[in-house]
Amino acid sequence: MPDLHIPLQAIKGRGVGHRVAHRFERDARIAFDDGWAGDEPHAGDQPPAPPTQVSFEDARSVITRNDSPDIGFNLGLNPYRGCEHGCVYCYARPSHSYLNLSPGLDFETRLIAKRNIAAVLRDELAHARYMPELIAVGTVTDAYQPVERELRLTRAALQVLSDAQHPLAIVTKGSGVERDIDLLAPMGAKNLAAVYVTVTTLDAKLARILEPRAAAPHRRLRTIRTLAEAGVPVGVSVSPQIPFINDDMEQVLEAAREAGAQRAFYQVLRLPWELAPLFRDWLVVHYPDRAERVIARVQDLRGGKDYDADFATRMKGQGIWADLLRQRFVKACDRLGLQRERMPLDTTAFRPSALKGQGDLF
């Protein structure tokens, strides 16, 4: 597959400007000017921005399990691989390497949709050995990215969970979650559902280049308000905290609390595998005056490295700067009356019998 080398400034609505080689590739390609381009017609024209492509897969299982001690849930559900939101900092970008796709432009333009997610989820929940516990929806890629408007795979999965009275929590940047209030509000009233909306910054200009196809900050605050007014328990994630980039944590928490958020959590920037050079490139393009300073502070949080996967520190970092972030967060939450623990949900209402005998309704 040929690499695309498009100046990041020329791509509207994309977080990364090229298809970086993934860690399993033997060869990497770089752009090279051989002097001939100037003689071609329209040589100064930029190539068109790559469109989003969606492929479909029939998943054999859809509930993922983790045993990481620093993650507050054991079960996850992700209708999509890749994410059109294009967040440049997304820790899930390197997961595209396992598909022989690039964590760069491929991650946000070549999506894989699990078209049979509802049927497989129904079978897994109805299995005799299944024991109910919280399922976190959108733990890797956003379940409400733009393609969900057409495919409605998240909606189908939520219907199954609703039928079974199974507890769920959603983390999203997408305002599309409002579409499913008819399912989430009754579940929320029974202590079976909670939604956490990620608001990284209130700065719309920054959000436009940091999270190019996610909802604007003011729109996410409106989503929090809409969910809260409908009776859905809602919280806010102020993740990731990026040194010297999004420095308005307290203002975000205050705005989210005013909109109706009850809980809050945060994580610091994580740069595993291919994400570190991708983020460096983004800094050079958008913040060349402070790029080195940002990376130096990131390394301060990671014991001198770009990233440390140690369970004890990978979410919040380590050292004096991590302590200062924690203190800021705790004091702001205490002042605003925001809970810092995830909402406990009920697992006793689970009804697997409601799933037996149902065909594929979706």
Image: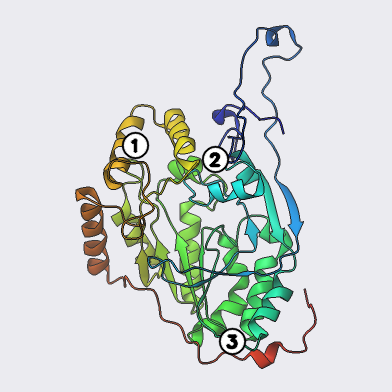
Give the percent coordinates (x, y) of residue 84. 61, 49
What's under tag 2, amino acid-wise?
Gly
Q: Which residue is mark 1?
A: 295
Q: Looking at the rendered structure, which numbered label has been put on residue 165?
A: 3
- Which element carries disc 3, helix, strand or loop? loop
Residue at 56% across / 77% down in the picture?
A: 184
Q: Earlier in the sequence, mark 1 or mark 2?
A: 2
Taking depth in this image into account, of 185 and 122 the one nearest to the observer is: 122
Task: Tell me the residue that label 2 is attached to.
Answer: 15
Does residue 149 appear to the left or right of 201 in the view shown? right
Q: Residues within 10 Å of mark 1 (few under 14, many from 20)?
A: many
Disc 1 marks which amino acid?
Ile
Residue at x 38%, y 57% (from the top left corner): 238
Mark 1 or mark 2, which is nearer to you?
A: 1
Direction from residue 31 to residue 318 in the image, left or right:
left
Q: Relative to residue 314, is residue 115 depicted above or below?
A: below
**In the image, residue 210 above or below residue 174:** above
Count the labels in the image. Answer: 3
Q: Which of the two residues, 292 or 247, is positioned nearer the viewer here?
A: 292
